[in-house]
Amino acid sequence: MIIAMLAIAFAGTALDAKIAALLPTKDEEKWMSIPWRTNLMRARKEAQESGKPMFWWIMNGHPLGCT
Amino acid sequence: MVGNTHEIQNGRNPVRDWFIPVATKVKPDIAKGSTAQGKYVIAADGTAYGFNNNRSIERVHQLLDRSLAQFKASPPVQVAISAAELEAKFVPEPPIGSAVVRLFTRVKPAPLGSDSANENVARDHFWILPEELKALSTGEMPEAFRMRLARFALVDSVRGEPDHWRPAEIVRAEFKLSPLRSSKVKGFSLTGTFSMQTQDLKRGYEGKLEGELTFGTENRLVSFKAFAEGQAWGASTYAPNPPAGKFPLLIAFVSVSDEASRVVAPQAVFYGREYLTGR
């Protein structure tokens, strides 16, 4: 969703075209469609209230801001 | 739940204090200093049901299926989670008044025959500090901004965590601002060239930068967009398998203000004060 908005925003000049060509494609953003939580303690509270376990993905380099 | 190992394992905060003992139950070598990087299934009470550090779809599904079965067989107990824990901060935050720029980096086109990791799109953030914004809004190029851009943003992060440039490795980083030819907005075009390389010449990046900054009332940054293109070469410690020789490396910069920009610190923030000063 955010990438689609960025792509629309960069639809004008030559600079905009260069930037737009580098933005992630839909396929490259599929994993971002998961509603990831980013606060451990609040995720704990939510997991407890919903009766579910948590799936944690921690990486050297934040998953939301890395390759 | 996603997080940065550097912040969660190496930080000094309630999040680390809770998570590391839990993670060690399913990855014991953490106690010997090994990285906690990986995927876990854990409950709010600290019960750990599974771990792997494998990206294959099959292995992740196996982890989830196995862990869910164990969760149902041995459900967790209710625990108290204090207000202090809920409010605990563990992510470095930009100085108040900073702007955040998102970077997208690609090897484009990826040379035929090069490792498939060269087809990745890398993401990172870059903080523009309040004192830098003040200077940029007058058309001035702050020294710290120049150095920080060269050291921490103009780098190959496509295949993994990059080795950021040391000050002595900046051969050239010449950037300037020129007023935009528009009576409607206050802004500047950004142009420049750069060249960075290691002392042994095994790794480097050289090219040009173009961009545009616009400001609103009270010199508030409205938009920052830029594009770097050049030739890179060599591998970083945790970003191996670059294409052979020199390859085209492109970086797009776009200003953002979404949740990710607030919770995902720049990769180079672990340099501490150096990240804020450039030296």
Image: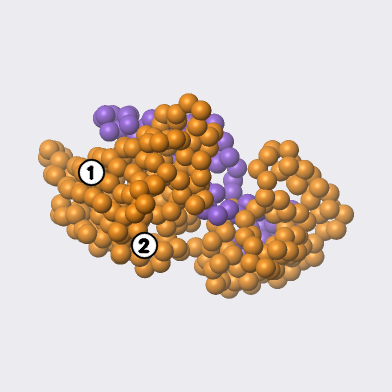
Chain colours: A purple, B orange
Residue matched to label 1: B193
Q: At which x and y percent is residue B61?
A: 74, 41
Rendered residue at 67%/64% (across/down)? B30
| Chain holding disc 2 | B
Q: At which x and y percent is residue B231?
A: 34, 37
Residue B130 lies left or right of residue B5; in this view the side is: left
**Amino acid on which the number 2 mark rests in the picture:** Tyr
Instruction: Evaluate whether residue B257 shows in this view.
Output: no
Rendered residue at 71%/51% (across/down)? B52
**Amino acid on which the number 1 mark rests in the picture:** Thr
Say which element carries label 1: strand
The Cα atoms of the two marked residues, 1 and 2, are separated by 21 Å
Q: Earlier in the sequence, mark 1 or mark 2?
A: 1
Q: What is the residue that sits farthest to the front in this orientation?
A: B200
Instruction: Evaluate whether residue B143 shows in this view.
Output: yes
Residue matched to label 2: B275
Q: At which x and y percent is residue B20?
A: 66, 66
Nearest to the observer: residue A11 or residue B124: B124
| Chain holding disc 1 | B
